[in-house]
Image: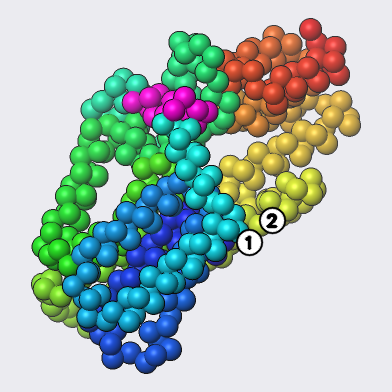
Amino acid sequence: MFQQPNVQASLMATAIALSVYLISSPDFRGRPVWVKSLPLICLLLSTFTLMSSDSRVGLLGGSAALVLILLSRFSLLKLRRGWALGMLVVLLAGGGSGLIINDGALRAYSKIEQLSGQGQDIRKDVYRISWEIIKDKPLLGHGIGSFQQVFHEKAAEYQLKTDGFNLGLWFSHPHNELLLWGIEGGAVGLLAFLFAIVAVLCQLICLGWQRGGAMAALLLPIALHTQVEHPFYVSAYHWVMFLFLLFVVFNQSGSKVYPLRVSFAAGALIRGLSIMLMLVVLWFCTTSLYYSNRIVHMLYSDKAKLAELNAIQQHPYFSEVATRLLLAHFSEAEKLSKGTSVTLEYVEWLQVYIKHVPDIGVFVDLIRAYAYLGDSVKMQATIDRALYLYRDHPLILKTAKEVKEKYSLY
């Protein structure tokens, strides 16, 4: 329900456009008063949340969506001026109270100034690095799932060429969906996106200005958000909302319906498979929610339960993180007996993992493991590699100093 500020903000921007759409819909007049009040309440709360969110992408998406839907539905809103006036009052009340509470819009404006000037926003450098990666393999890209590996390699080169620039962070996404698929899928991947975008635009045009413009306003906040962050990867709400809105766009009146007649056996098979699929998805999501909570609890309490980790390891989504936690636990326990066999296995696993996911935390674990094994050459090579990718990172520098002092490795 309450998420990272930018993620929440693009949902609230969508809610603002949706509230105006409902008030302007032709069947709004015949609804009970308490039903008519619901869009106004939603408009009040979503405007308040958006204006206090400190999110420039939310403010930009919400503003653009509001202007677009007001222009496209102006002729309908004129017919119910009392509700339109109430909508204006609610917008001003929600926005004003949001500003008073948190000064969100002022801070978001400050961020926009920072981005347009010579500020510290790192996103413009991330975009430049991503574009350089695309130019290396423009046709087919670097392969699905390759982003983290190729991005940090190119970012390290970029750091050397750009005097004073320090990436300082681990990136799993370039904060732009088109750039991600350009890197991993090349022109072929982007062409698939282009076909999808053209299909949606054609449908919106076919719906006409009044309805198509309103539908475009509903899609705009989340679509814009995908170009500066990665909402679909951190929020199931955005997936569900965006897919539902696309369904509404392609299911407007005037769309053709083709009846599909199947035999009784085929119908029973489809129903049976649908129920089985629903049960599998339900199991997967339920266990994922439970295991993710347990993993977070283990990390914060620093108490790994072996039986629980073994169970989590069988889950396809959490297999890697559970394996890492298990090996880390056994490696730590092995130090009491001065053994090395498990730690060697742990090091081997980390070496393979870090080639594809150059996470700062993995580098730290690998440095500590090499220090315990007394392998100063590989430890120093790992430190150098980590500092090459993440120049002067404080955690890496701190770890290197600690292990050298603890194990007298210089």
Q: Is 149 placed above or below 110 here?
A: above
371 is within the stretch colored magenta: no
Range of the magenta residues?
117-131
Q: Quadrant of residue 376?
A: top right
Q: Which mark is residue 294?
A: 2
Residue situated furthest right in the rendering: 336
* Circle 2/circle 1 CB separation < 8 Å: yes
Location of the N terminus (image quadrant): bottom right
Secondary structure of the magenta portion, mostly?
helix
> Is there any visible trace of residue 165 in the rendered image?
yes
As for residue 120 lying within the magenta part, the answer is: yes
- Residue at 51% over, 47% down: 106
Work out which quarter of the rendered image holds the C terminus and state it: top right
Element at badge 2?
helix
Q: Residues within 10 Å of mark 2 (few under 14, many from 20)?
A: some
The residue under label 1 is 290
Kind of residue at disc 1: Tyr
Give the Cα distance between marks 2 and 1: 6 Å
**Residue, x 71% and y 42% (percent of image)?**
326
The picture places residue 344, in percent across and down from the top left corner, at: 70, 25
- From the viewer's side, name the closer residue of 320 and 20: 20
Q: Which mark is residue 255?
A: none
Question: Where is residue 398, by image quadrant?
Answer: top right
Query: Which residue is rendered at x = 55% and y = 20% of the image?
Result: 166
**Residue 219 in view:** no
Position in image of residue 384 (x %, y %): 63, 13
